[in-house]
Structures are given as structure tokens and as C-alpha cells.
Image (spheres, rainbow, N blue to C red):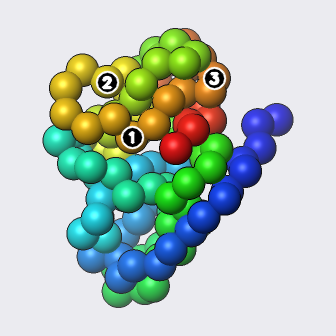
């Protein structure tokens, strides 16, 4: 079982429904492939709620593809962690994922 070590969290107004284990952008929506990620919601939130978002530490994130441990990661179009190809790194993978849908720890 993988655990989180959240060192810092903040709140922001959820502009849309936010899913647990998916990156969130600074506008309060699920991060897209070119977005800078603010962090990861601590639970699911509905649009209009004040969402608590873990911004620093070791957070669980759903992988969007295979990811190597230690790789720099970014958000894919649906907020999942993928290996950094271009744009802004959202952190480093603490664990490897062999396929999409697996939970990995991301250091930020």
C-alpha cells in the first residue's frame, strides 16, 4: 500500500468537478497537458466547493501511461501523470507505473 506525505496544502475554488489523484491547475480545474499543476486534491470536489489541494510533499497521482521511477512528470490532458515530454514538470515519480491507471507517488 502506497501512502502520502503531504507537507503543504492550500485551498482554491473548484471551477469544475475535481477528481482525487489527478493534477489540478491554478485556475481550479483539472490540469491539462500544457498546464502548470498546482497540486493534487486531497479528495474529490464538486464545482463551486473550496477544494483542499496538496501542493508539496509526496502525493498519490494516477498514471496516464507507463512511467519510470525518478522520471520528471507532467499532466496529461486529463490530469494524470505522464513522463515529461514538453512544458512544465509537475514533480518526479517516486514509483514506476507499468500502465495507465496505476497510482504512483509524485514528489513535489
Whether residue 107 is situated above or below residue 12 in the rendered picture: above
Nearest to N terminus: mark 2 or mark 1: 2
Res 71 label: none
Whether residue 43 is situated above or below residue 77 in the rendered picture: below
**Quick check: can you spot residue 69?**
yes
What SS does tag 3 mark?
loop
What SS does tag 2 mark?
loop
Q: Residue at x 55, y 61 (%)?
A: 54
Q: Residue at x 39, y 79 (%)?
A: 12
Q: Position of residue 42 (x, y in %)?
A: 59, 64
Tell me if 66 is positioned left or right of 70 in this view.
Answer: left
Crowdedness near tag 1: few (<14), some (14–19) or many (≥20) residues, C-alpha within 10 Å: many
- The residue singled out by tag 3 in the image is 95
Disc 3 from disc 2: Cα separation: 15 Å
Nearest to N terminus: mark 1 or mark 3: 1
Crowdedness near tag 2: few (<14), some (14–19) or many (≥20) residues, C-alpha within 10 Å: some
Q: Residue at x 54, y 27 (%)?
A: 93
Q: Position of residue 3 (x, y in %)?
A: 77, 44
Q: Quadrant of residue 27?
A: bottom left
Nearest to N terminus: mark 3 or mark 2: 2
Q: Residue at x 42, y 25 (%)?
A: 72
- The residue singled out by tag 2 in the image is 84
Res 90 label: 1
**Quick check: can you spot residue 44?**
no
- Of the two numbered discs 1 and 3 in the rendering, the one whose residue sits closer to the viewer: 1
Disc 1 from disc 3: Cα separation: 15 Å
Q: Pointers 1 and 3 in contact (CB under 8 A)?
A: no
Amino acid at each position: 500500500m502506497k501512502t502520502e506525505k503531504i507537507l503543504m496544502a492550500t485551498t482554491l475554488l473548484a471551477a469544475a468537478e475535481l477528481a482525487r489523484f489527478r493534477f489540478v491547475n491554478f485556475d481550479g480545474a483539472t490540469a491539462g497537458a500544457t498546464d502548470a499543476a498546482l497540486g493534487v486534491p486531497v479528495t474529490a470536489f464538486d464545482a463551486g466547493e473550496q477544494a483542499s489541494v496538496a501542493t508539496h510533499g509526496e502525493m498519490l497521482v494516477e498514471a496516464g501511461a507507463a512511467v519510470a521511477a525518478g522520471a520528471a512528470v507532467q499532466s496529461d490532458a486529463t490530469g494524470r501523470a505522464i513522463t515529461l515530454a514538453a512544458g512544465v514538470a509537475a514533480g518526479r515519480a517516486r514509483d514506476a507505473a507499468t500502465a495507465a491507471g496505476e497510482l504512483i507517488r509524485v514528489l513535489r
